[in-house]
Amino acid sequence: MVAARRWPVISALGIVQILAWGSSYYLMAVLAQPIVNDTGWPLPWVVGALSLGLACGGLASPLVGRWIARLGGRPVLAAGCTLLTAGLLICAAAPGLSAFYLGWCVIGLGMSAGLYDPAFATLGRLYREQARSAITALTLWGGFASTVSWPLSTWLLEQFDWRGTVAIWAALHALVSLPLILCLVPREPRVPSEVHPEGRDELRLGGAERWAFLVMAAILVLSGLAVTMISVHLLTFLQAQGLSLADAVAIGALLGPAQVVARVVEMAGRGRHHPIWSLLFACGSVAAGLILLALDLQLPAVAMILYGAGNGVFSIARGAMPLALFGPERYPALMGRLARPALLAQAAAPVLGGALVGMLGPGAALAIIAAFGVVNFALAISLSRVCSAGFRGARS
């Protein structure tokens, strides 16, 4: 597919990503308290629905990756959009907490087939070795998900109740996301089942490959834990260091611009450097930001800029690095396999973070999260040594 035809595909997937993230991962930040106020359901149980959805998505992710490898991304992304629509409608009509949780189970399955990992796998199958620039461009769109979705959810909540807001998000998937996928994402030829019997052959990894896969999985798990804990508890950490709520919110607002600027800089490089350097920068910058924040040196803005820049580039590296390591043929299936532990870590992170804050206090909890960042940087260094030793990624 020629480069000129990439932009309609990337733009369509970018809009789909904004709507998918906004109606799933970012939804409860705005709607959790209104749901509690309207239903009387306990807040921890309402917020826990997101963790359940992430867990369901993590369990389904390897199967999603194999489907993309066999069928292409178009039908899988369309199925993910349909599942998100159905899950949101179930939540909007839920008469009780059990039905609400059922809706989030369906949303979780939609997340496994509709967020970054399946979108990256789709781009990898479409553009093969040249997919890195497309992945980078897609993350620029994704960087605006919270910027768009939080104000939109807030405005919808003012016009309707929380049920109406959730129903409108479902309608956006049916009327916007699904047509974009069906009209602009190319149909790909189906891979015959005998090429990859039962979806297992493409997952066979040798010694160096297996080590690289396990290191990459560990990086994704620790990143999922750290980023989700920071997302949930950032204001608590900042206020524990003496900042007012208004100042904490202002500092937290630096994350979005830092992520987008870092992604623009990465995109300007046009993929001339190996993605291991992007991964090293991402993990190192995140670790530096978390250490600076944990040391309470009264430089929270600098810490958030470092952390945000690293997190922004990490979104690119997590898609580009497996492509360079394992090649385009196995990329969709292995991305699905890598997504499982990452999503399960994100599902556990809110509860684990809350337990750490409750038992040890915000300062000690933040120190543990910073330690996750340091370990991740060390893992990225070990992965770079594997690449420099002559593994496939060193030649990509």
Image (cartoon, rainbow, N blue to C red):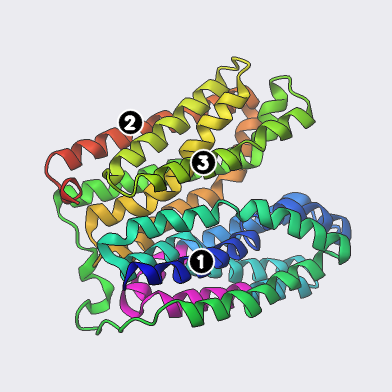
Frontmost residue, 115 versus 59: 115
Where does label 3 land, which residue?
261
Which amino acid, by three-letter code, is at mark 3? Val
Q: Residue at x 66, y 35 (%)?
A: 252
On the image, which quarter does residue 167 sit in? Answer: bottom right
Frontmost residue, 215 versus 97: 215
In the image, taking residue 328 as reference, residue 112 lies left or right, namely right
Q: Residue at x 38, y 69 (%)?
A: 4
Along the polypeptide, which appears first: circle 1 or circle 3? 1
| Vertical position of residue 107 compared to residue 361: above or below | below
- Identify the secondary structure beneath mark 1: helix
Q: Main secondary structure of the magenta part?
A: helix
Along the polypeptide, which appears first: circle 2 or circle 1? 1
Rounded to the nearest angstrom, the CA distance separating label 1 from label 3 is 19 Å
| Vertical position of residue 248 compared to residue 59: above or below | above
Q: Are dots 2 and 3 in contact, CB under 8 Å?
A: no
On the image, which quarter does residue 54 sit in? Answer: bottom right
Where does label 1 land, which residue?
11
Structural crowding at the residue carrying mark 2, measured as other residues with C-alpha within 10 Å and reported as few (<14), some (14–19) or many (≥20):
some
Which residues lie in the magenta part? Answer: 59-84
Where does label 2 land, which residue?
378
Residue 148 coordinates in the image, percent (x, y): 67, 56
Q: The N terminus is located in which quarter?
A: bottom left
